[in-house]
């Protein structure tokens, strides 16, 4: 992979193609793939190609890329058939929120009624 510093990051490895995943979208900024342990009929993870450890580490440089991710998520939700019925886009930041992979990612969840507030 190009950036050896993140060779141990599973999401960098998926983004580079070194590790297999079921991709639903990829472009120069974002990679979207199905979660290995889906929590809803649609459970897609969207990640920036660039390794950033969490929302807290985002810089202004990432603003347009993150905006792009949100729009790509809406397109994927529509393609998955939950664009109108409803979906949730969520990023866990930090251990108490449930972040387990230290590469910024957004969960796109849909295809069933989602409870609120989340657990
Ligand atoms: P977090 O808990 O950090 O918010 O979300 C990490 C997500 O990554 C989890 O939902 C988990 O199921 C998913 N995940 C972890 N390892 C892999 C993997 O190797 N492949 C895929 N497709 N998803 C993974
Ligand atoms: Zn990474």
Image (tube, rainbow, N blue to C red):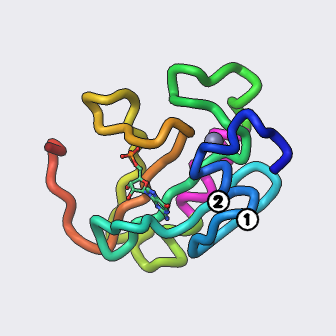
Question: What residue sits 60% from the left and 62% below the top?
Answer: 32
Give, as a single range, the part of the protein colored magenta: 65-74
On the image, the x and y values in percent for residue 70 come to 57, 48
On the image, the x and y values in percent for residue 43 come to 40, 66
| Foreground residue among 10 and 93 | 10
Q: Which residue is mark 1?
A: 17
Label 2, ligand 1: CB separation under 8 Å: yes
From this viewpoint, is residue 69 visible?
Answer: no
* Quadrant of the rendered image containing residue 79: bottom right
* Quadrant of the rendered image containing residue 18: bottom right
* CA separation in Å, label 1 and label 2: 5 Å
Name the element at disc 2.
helix
Question: What residue sits 47% from the left and 64% below the top?
Answer: 44
Q: Is residue 67 magenta?
A: yes
Give the quadrant of the C terminus. top left
Question: What residue sits 56% from the left and 54% below the top?
Answer: 46
Q: Quadrant of ligand 2?
A: top right
State yes or no: discs 1 and 2 in contact (Cβ < 8 Å).
Answer: yes
On the image, the x and y values in percent for residue 55 come to 51, 28
Name the element at disc 1.
loop
What label does residue 95 carry, if any?
A: none
Label 1, ligand 1: CB separation under 8 Å: no
Horizontal side of 47 relative to 77 (left or right) equals right
The chief SS type of the magenta part is: helix
Q: Which residue is mark 2?
A: 14
Give the crowd class for mark 1: few <14, some 14-19, many >=20 residues within 10 Å. few
């Amino acid at each position: 992979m190009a950036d050896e510093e993140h060779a141990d990051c599973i999401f960098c490895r998926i983004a580079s193609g070194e590790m297999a995943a079921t991709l639903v979208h990829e472009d120069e900024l974002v990679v979207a793939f199905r979660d290995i342990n889906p929590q809803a009929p649609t459970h897609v993870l969207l990640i920036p190609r660039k390794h950033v450890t969490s929302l807290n580490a985002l810089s202004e440089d990432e603003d347009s890329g993150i905006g792009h991710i949100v729009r790509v998520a809406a397109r994927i939700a529509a393609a998955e058939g939950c664009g109108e019925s409803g979906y949730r886009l969520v990023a866990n930041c930090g251990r108490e929120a449930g972040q387990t992979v230290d590469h910024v990612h957004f969960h796109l969840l849909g295809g069933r009624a989602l409870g609120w507030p989340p657990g």
